[in-house]
Amino acid sequence: MEHRARKRFGQHFLHDRNAINRIVDAIDPARDDRLVEIGPGLGAITLPLLERVDTLHAVELDRDVIPLLKEKAGGRNLVVHHADALKFDFGALAEEIGTPLRLAGNLPYNVSSPLLFHFLSYREVIRDMHFMLQKEVVDRMAAPPGSKTYGRLTVMLAADCEIQPLFNLRPGAFSPPPKVDSAVVRLRVREQPALPILDRERFARLVAAAFMQRRKTLRNSLREFLTEQQIAAAGIDPSARPETLSAEEFARLAAA
């Protein structure tokens, strides 16, 4: 029986064989890697990955595809966790199977940013991540300061990851085809944070506040955090707008 993609889960099933091969080659898993697939769906990259690793863990929200996945796996070592990846405890999984984890998958476009922030909260146990995402999101992830796509996601990821856009995917590679272009991205988690962040919660709140009012100057958008004099003392122009600041400059403001 054919399983139809569900809109509420943001499902778009990958079926393009060339795209699947490129993704698996980009992940390049070793036999003993602790690989975790997010949202395996109907198993497009699950099955090729299973040929390359001893054990593959998968986190899947749609309970109806799980029997289909296990049937397709044909007795190979696939461990499916029926759970919402947004709430899944990757720390507990790492404790159970060892570290570092490697994450991969086709992320639902409607919750891709919250998922990325959730994964980042487990950065200590993750080595890298390979995801299919909306191209617009990948552009934001890798955007330079001063560009229109530069924002909160860019700054938060820059603190902990090296971002490498790999290649684009056409809508026809998926069923049903999404209305937007897609891209595959690699995130390598840094062993040491790139920025001197003393208080991550404060850093996150400050960055969120700045970009919530991205057209306003820092003296206005950050007035609940810092005075104009404190911003200037950190070596930053209070009349600057958030999208012109590097991640390192945001870290300086958070420290101030």
Image (cartoon, rainbow, N blue to C red):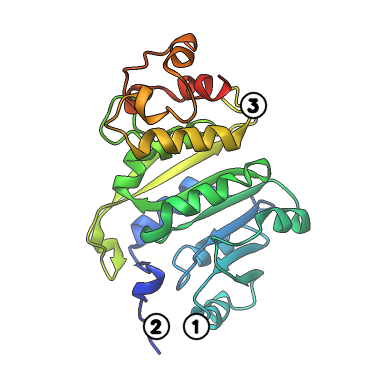
Residue type at mark 1? Asp
Residue type at mark 2? His
Question: Could you say which quadrant of the image residue 8 lies in?
Answer: bottom left
Q: Which mark is residue 64?
A: 1
Residue bearing mark 2: 3
Considering the numbered disc 3 on the image, is that residue within a helix, a strand or a loop? loop
Give neighbour class at mark 2: few <14, some 14-19, many 20+ (Cα, 10 Å).
few
Q: CA distance from mark 1 to mark 2?
A: 8 Å
Q: Is residue 108 above or below residue 215?
A: below
Question: What residue is shown at x 49% (from left), y 83% (from top)?
Answer: 64
- Mark 1 near mark 2, Cβ–Cβ under 8 Å? yes
Question: What residue is shown at x 64% (from left), y 26% (from top)?
Answer: 198
- The disc, 3 or 2, on the residue closer to the chain's N-terminal end is 2
Q: Which mark is residue 198?
A: 3
Question: What residue is shown at x 47% (from left), y 24% (from top)?
Answer: 250
Question: Could you say which quadrant of the image residue 172 lies in?
Answer: bottom left
| Residue in front for this viewpoint, 15 or 199 | 199
